[in-house]
Image (cartoon, rainbow, N blue to C red):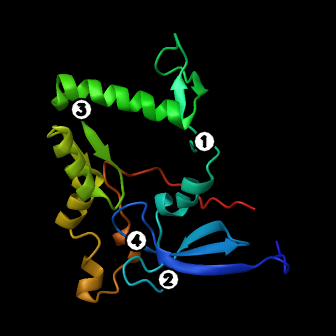
Amino acid sequence: MAANPARKREVKSTTCYMCACRCGINVTVEDGEVRFIQGNPAHPINQGVLCAKGASGIMKQYSPARLTRPLRRKAGAERGNSEFEEISWEQAFSAIGERLQHIRDTDPKKFALYTGRDQMQALTGLFAKQFGTPNYAAHGGFCSVNMAAGLIYPSAALSGSSADPTSNVHACSSCSAPPKTIIRIR
């Protein structure tokens, strides 16, 4: 399929944040929208290899299942039945505030906080301590630590090795996903 000459198409080189490996990626952008993600062959760590998770990073923005509004379980609906109703942001913040206040007033240690792959892990701990709970964790404690211990991501770069780039593909018990093809949106 030939590219439409009227469309502005460019490739941006950046870093994948789907896990802590921080592989180099090339993101194809067309008219300001991401179209697909590929490994960057010029990157010293992944050398163009990209796992299914990294290639599917586009879905963080464009997935039809992505939540864009607050939802509340319908009255009488059982957990797991996917019966929700849309509510306003004000209703959502009010409900969360009431629930958190009740937990904080009765037993803050019943509250556990977990954050995913973000750059705010220090604030997670600060919030949890201020709330009164020791129960908090972040993705790095489950994924990055394992990678560092196994020297998965720095080994080829530090040794100057031209090892098989597939040896640097990340897979850990908390993040691995089955192989998928690159998802392209046209």
Dots 3, 2 in contact, CB < 8 A: no
- Report x, y in % for residue 155: 25, 78
Where residue 98 sits, quadrant-wise, is top left
- Name the amino acid type tagged 3: Phe
- Name the amino acid type tagged 2: Pro
Quadrant of the rendering where the N terminus is positioned: bottom right
Where residue 67 sits, quadrant-wise, is top right
In the image, taking residue 27 as reference, residue 110 lies left or right, namely left
Identity of the residue drawn at 26% across and 61% down: 144
Residue furthest to the top: 76
> Which residue was labeled with disc 1?
65
In the image, taking residue 167 as reference, residue 87 lies left or right, namely right
Q: Gap in Å between the C-alphas at discs 4 and 3? A: 40 Å
- Report x, y in % for residue 142: 25, 51
Which residue occupies the foreground of this view, 154 or 27?
Answer: 27
Q: Gap in Å between the C-alphas at discs 1 and 3? A: 28 Å
Residue 166 got which mark?
4
Quadrant of the rendering where the C terminus is positioned: bottom right
Dots 2, 4 in contact, CB < 8 A: no
Figure check: 94 above or below 129: above
> Which residue was labeled with disc 3?
111
Nearest to the eye among marks 4 and 3: give it.
3
Figure check: 24 above or below 55: below
